[in-house]
Image (spheres, rainbow, N blue to C red):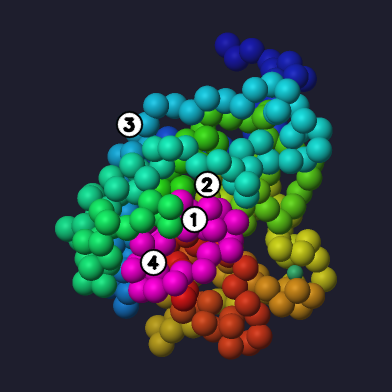
Amino acid sequence: MQNLLTPEEIAVQAGAEDLPHRLPAADVFALRAARLRQLADGHAMADFLRFAAHLADAQDTLLRHRTPETRPDDAHLQRCRQHGMPPIGAYDAALPADWAYLLQAIAAEVAPHAPAGLQNALADLADFPRARLDALARDILRTEEHLANAVELALAPLIGASLQVLWTARARALQPADVPAGFEGSQCPACGSHPVASILRIGDGGHGVRYATCSLCATEWHVTRIKCVPCLNTRDIAYQALDGASGNPHPAVKAETCPDCHSSLKIVSMERDPLVDAFADDLATLALDMLVDETGFHRAGRNLFLFTP
Ligand code: FE
Ligand code: FE
């Protein structure tokens, strides 16, 4: 015999599909690595995607073996909830003393798979000035990186990968109610960073629910469909997708373009492919960014495996 649900239970279940945000799961990097390998098969940038998968493997190992982070204290969490401030804000955050250990561990892990350009940079890493590494990490957290040379450009994705491990661990120490809700915005409600892309998940009712995925801590926050995430405009939103000789090679990915701020953010759809990962599918569809760029929209997503001089 089945018990009838109380109104409270019904309310809880109905809310499950429209959670205001989703904190990162323990296997976030493992799933990402698997998706990157799947996308690499037959891809024009297969080597790059396979290398990114090795980076995600290294991140997975570090996250699993890391001592869980301490949850911020109650007064801080309450202040953040009240004012819609990110409780694990990245912008002005102090770096833990051992952050460079993460970088060294990732470097050691991926070295056997690294492309030639990165091999040289990795060889220099042991002698690389620690103060400069700290400065690069802080700049990446502030989205203000100025990469001075080829070595720094090659190391930046590894620094980004280390910071992702740290902030994903910090986000995992949070409880869902710790993250400010009701402030739908263009930046992560947990850490304040930019989204890498957005993802259309399948809600319990079978309809799509859209979340933006944080480029740093992997937290997802609910965003309205057909709305520009960077500027929150809802008018004249349009979509672009790839078009190959034999149809769209990535049918689960489209770019949402906004005529107001001229930016574009990708949407990866679980309705089209249940295995999509915002970060991995973003890396596999850089051709779409070029297409969108040619029509006058700039890429709003931030991917910490991608840096330009
Ligand atoms: Fe975040
Ligand atoms: Fe916009």
Give yes or no for contact between labels 4 and 1 (Cβ–Cβ under 8 Å): no
Some atom of ligand 1 lies within 8 Å of the CB belonging to the residue at label 2: yes
Give yes or no for contact between labels 4 and 3 (Cβ–Cβ under 8 Å): no
Q: Which residue is denoted by mark 3 in the rendering?
A: 65
Query: Identity of the amino acid at label 2?
Result: Ala
Query: Identity of the amino acid at label 1?
Result: Ala
Q: Which residue is denoted by mark 1 in the rendering?
A: 135
Which numbered mark, 4 or 3, is in the foreground of this view?
A: 4
Some atom of ligand 1 lies within 8 Å of the CB belonging to the residue at label 1: no
Of marks 4 and 3, which one's residue comes earlier in the chain?
3
- Frontmost residue, 303 versus 127: 127
**Can you tell which mark lies on residue 218?**
2
Report the magenta residues as a range.
Answer: 134-158
Mark 4–mark 3 distance (CA, rounded to whole Å): 27 Å
Q: What's the residue at 53%, 29% (across, down)?
A: 173
Give yes or no for contact between labels 4 and 2 (Cβ–Cβ under 8 Å): no
Mark 1–mark 2 distance (CA, rounded to whole Å): 23 Å
Q: Which residue is denoted by mark 4 in the rendering?
A: 152
In the rendered image, residue 300, in percent from the top left (x then y), is placed at 62, 68
Q: Is residue 179 left or right of residue 197?
A: right
Please tell me whether the stretch drawn in magenta is mainly helix, strand or loop. helix
Of marks 3 and 2, which one's residue comes earlier in the chain?
3
